[in-house]
Amino acid sequence: MAKKISVINFKGGVGKTTLAFHLAAHLAEKKAVLVVDIDHQSSLSIVMLGGKLWEDAASSRRTSNTIFESFCNRKVAMPGQEVITKNPLHARRPEHDFYPKLDLVPAQFELDDTEIELASTTLGSATVSEWQKRTLLAEWLDKINANNTYDYVIFDCPPATKLVSQNALAASDYFIIPVIPDVMSSRGVTHFRQLVTEKIDKKLDFLKTGAGISPKDTPASYVPTTKMAAIVPWLAKHAGNARSGLTSLHTEQLLSLRARWGNDIIQTVVKSFTGVAEAMDAGWPVWTAYETQNIKKSIPMMRNACVEIEARLT
């Protein structure tokens, strides 16, 4: 049975893509992992595929966009395995085969247009339609037999709780929130967690009941209650002379987050090191990328964060 995880926050620029990529690569060292990019910005897809292969996938409609477009356009069939790029890091660099168990469903820019169309499309009963448009990813996971093919499915979500993100949460056992330890992000964690539990999960249950969806018509990959696996301190600004190793502002906000959320926050603090960006630009996790002093310095914190998160995905 695949464990499905959404890496998500209602804010952009908090490190979702970097976390999703490193967690997927970490898990794929031993297990079969599918990454599903549902952020129309396609940053993770471009990192993993490179520009040329990503453009090829987008032009031939082998992306997550087709999953959602199948609801809006009756001429578009729900896709199957064809939207999966097998072993993308090897496909990008045939001379390397570091992650043979890591697959990708890329995104494309047009997903943003499809999201708008999805929100305005109603087919038949309004309640049934609202349920169906939020469980498209779950339906697709069933179609490809994800539960028996993969050990983990990781969704890289856009910086919002749009319908595509609600689809990911509807299919996820867990969600992970990367958070910059500043005032806005600290407040946002509380808001976002309540949004998932009080609005998204409960609305899906309401729609399922109201639409009279029977157990046999419910996708096996639908998860009625999505648990928070971890809050991950991310992009913290380091200060070499400080006792905490962080700036005063980030030290204070991290203490505030820990006081509020306790063990929900992992112990590892991922600092804003340039080596992480260097490795991402090269299309590798930090522990596989070419070695520079900056990248080497980034490896322990990135690896420790992934190990902590993996331990919570039980």
Image (tube, rainbow, N blue to C red):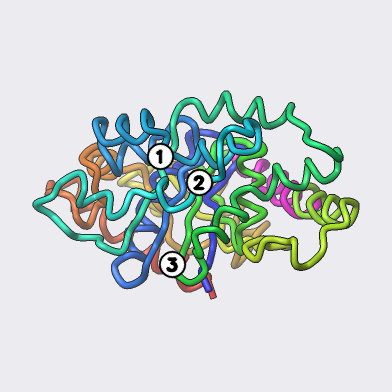
Is residue 189 magenta-colored?
A: yes
Q: Secondary structure at mark 2?
A: loop
Classify 10 Å Cα crowding around label 2: few (below 14), some (14-19), many (20 and above). Answer: many
Mark pair 3, 1: CA separation = 19 Å
Would you name the residue on which mark 3 appears?
A: 150
Front-lying residue, 202 or 86: 86
Residue drawn at x 58%, y 34% is 69
Is residue 40 magenta-colored?
A: no
Give the residues in magenta: 185-198
Front-lying residue, 150 or 181: 150
Query: Left or right: where does residue 60 sit relative to residue 223?
Result: left
Three-letter code, disc 3: Tyr
Three-letter code, disc 1: Arg
- The x, y position of residue 152, in whole percent, is 46, 65
Q: In the figure, residue 214 lies in which quadrant?
A: bottom right
Residue drawn at x 29%, y 67% is 29
Mark number displayed over residue 62: 1
Would you name the residue on which mark 2 appears?
A: 79
Query: Left or right: where does residue 21 sit relative to residue 227?
Result: left
- The x, y position of residue 59, in whole percent, is 36, 28
Classify 10 Å Cα crowding around label 3: few (below 14), some (14-19), many (20 and above). Answer: some
The residue at the far right in this view is 210
